[in-house]
Amino acid sequence: MSEELILAIETSCDETSAAVIRGGKHICSNIVSSQIDIHERFGGVVPEIASRKHVETITRIIEAAIKESGYEAKDLSAIAVTEGPGLVGALLVGNVAAKSLALALDIPLIATHHIAGHIYASRLEHTMVFPALALVVSGGHTELVLLPQEGVFHIIGRTRDDAVGEAYDKVARALKLPYPGGPHIDRLAQQAEEENVLPRAWLEQDSYDFSFSGLKSAVLAAINQHRMKGLELNESAIAKGFQQSVIDVLVTKALRAAKQYEVKQLILCGGVAANRGLRTELAAACQQEGLQLIVPSPKLCTDNAAMIGAAAAVKYKHGEFAGLDMKADPGLSLEAWSIKI
Ligand code: KG4
Ligand code: ZN
């Protein structure tokens, strides 16, 4: 049997993306159109503008993805789309496009979970082995996800307030850096010669949950203190202190969980996985523990449709398809999205 060809669509936030994935692993095309330049002036994503921009670009992006893949629409086996979580109006655009295509081509529709996509992005470049643990760090999510087997997800820890990426973006805003702030803080932290040491939120001793709002407040307090005393702000020292606090907590909790659940592999994924400091320190800690770490390359860490195609392929294999009455679900549960076994 030849490998299935999935056209995947992602419109959950501020990237309009379409990709063609063969056999759940091979990227035939992956077109990403970012809206960052539009939202930048507002300091964050404006949902209504995001939806309108998706409407304007989606058809062109889908056509480009099919063309670049070297295949034709008639060769496709299924259409996958991010069902949720995300911004409802943004998700809706991808959902309507996917349903129309599935109906017109008379092929199955696969409703896909955005976070499963971030996790399965790893399969596009690496071999996944189970049980695995995923540290998901993005603009909207911070989760430790246990995958006892293919397509099954258990959340063992999550943020109780801000997501890591959200904290990065808020701190960057306070430091008057452009949106999205993650890469700018990362750059400043790498350049820093001094570190403004900030607190770490460990929570209860055995908890795998996270909290970043206290750290964000500590950064704001440090900035205000400098301003009140009329002192010059050492932005890079603050960036380094913030980044170091985030990394310490993420690395320590991920390694403790990996040990407790005896996983064979740790997967780092989501937009913040592009962070150089985090990648380096997690790699060093895993090497010391003899734990295999896989991290997608930076372009597959941030939102893209290839990752949606990779996750959808698992559902394709199990014949779990959606009906044309599928609705975009901004609060879609990852655990409930697990394959039916
Ligand atoms: O996964 P993603 O593209 O979108 C969501 O699903 O949220 O993640 C976007 C987030 C933003 O908050 C951005 O600031 C952060 O990822 N990010 C980074 C880096 N690159 C992107 N955070 C820290 N360091 C980076 N190098
Ligand atoms: Zn994402």
Image (cartoon, rainbow, N blue to C red):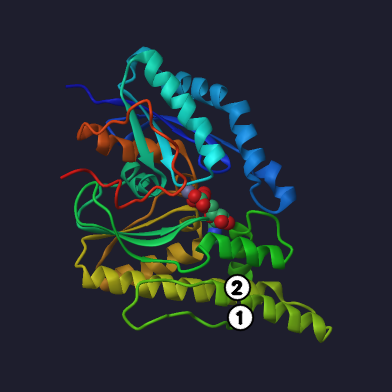
Residue 88 versus residue 184: which sits nearer the camera? Answer: 88
Q: Quadrant of residue 24 in the image?
A: top left
Which tag is nearer the camera, tag 2 or tag 1? 2
In x, y percent, where is residue 117?
A: 38, 44
Is residue 176 among what the camera can see?
A: yes
In which quadrant is the C terminus drawn? top left
Relative placement, left or right, of 261 versus 270 is left
Q: Residue drawn at (50%, 55%), measured in percent from left and top?
A: 140
The residue lying at 59 percent from left, 59 percent from top is 182
- Residue depicted at 55% across the width and 27% down the height: 58
Residue 31 visible (yes or no)? no
Q: Position of residue 115 (x, y in %)?
A: 39, 49
Residue in the image at 46% along x and 65% along y: 278
Crowdedness near tag 2: few (<14), some (14–19) or many (≥20) residues, C-alpha within 10 Å: many
SS state under label 1: loop
Q: What x and y, as percent, mark residue 52?
A: 64, 33
Along the polypeptide, which appears first: circle 2 or circle 1? Answer: 1
Q: Say which quadrant the N terminus sits in.
A: top left
Out of 273 and 103, give the one closest to the viewer. Answer: 103
For this view, does 119 lie left or right of residue 19?
left
Q: Secondary structure at mark 2?
A: helix
Horizontal side of 86 relative to 207 (left or right) equals right
Q: Amino acid at mark 1?
A: Glu
Residue marked by disc 2: 216
- How far apart marks 2 and 1 lie (CA) works out to 16 Å
State the mark number for residue 335.
none
Is 55 displayed left or right of 159 in the figure? right
Outermost bottom residue: 229
